[in-house]
Amino acid sequence: MKGISREDVRHLAWLAKIELSAQEEETLSKQMADILNYFKILDKIDTKSIEPAYHVREVKNVFRPDEPRKANPDEILKLAPAKKGRYVKAPKIV
């Protein structure tokens, strides 16, 4: 497998909107190549007899019962970051 070039790292940095020095590009190029080489080693492991694990632990969604209740506008307004009278104040959008 070919290594990760500095141009690849530069492109990834551009996508992530970060600036890297030439030294950081070189370092990351080597580190990313090492990571991909490690995946090559993992690809060689025989996993045919191992069942896929979607979660390490058994995970279930826990939902509260959905019960309708009457809204209290005064309680809702207390949560607003800015208000004017009985209205929520929002920034002007043009």
Image (cartoon, rainbow, N blue to C red):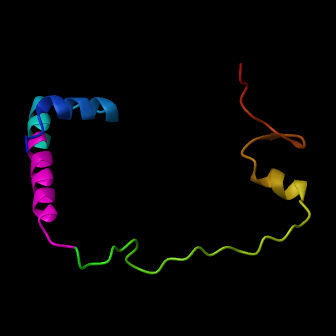
Quadrant containing the C terminus is top right
Quadrant hosting residue 91: top right
Quadrant containing the N terminus is top left
The image position of residue 57, as x and y in percent, is 41, 80
- Between 59 and 73, which is closer to the camera in this rendering? 59
Q: Is residue 58 left or right of residue 86?
A: left
Q: Is residue 62 magenta?
A: no
The image position of residue 4, as x and y in percent, is 12, 39
- The reply to whether residue 17 is visible in this rendering is no
Tell me the magenta residue range. Answer: 29-47
Which residue is found at the position 39% from the left and 71% from the top? 54
- Between 53 and 57, which is closer to the camera in this rendering? 53
Which residue is found at the position 16% from the left and 58% from the top? 39
Q: Is residue 44 magenta?
A: yes
User: Would you place residue 33 above or below residue 61 in this image?
Assistant: above
User: Would you place residue 41 above or below residue 86 in this image?
Assistant: below
The image position of residue 10, as x and y in percent, is 20, 30
Which residue is found at the position 67% from the left and 73% from the top? 63
Quadrant hosting residue 2: top left
- Between 50 and 72, which is closer to the camera in this rendering? 50
- The reply to whether residue 76 is visible in this rendering is yes
Q: For the stretch drawn in magenta, what is the main secondary structure?
A: helix
User: Would you place residue 69 above or below residue 74 in this image?
Assistant: below
Q: How many marks?
A: 0
Quadrant hosting residue 24: top left
The image position of residue 14, as x and y in percent, is 29, 29
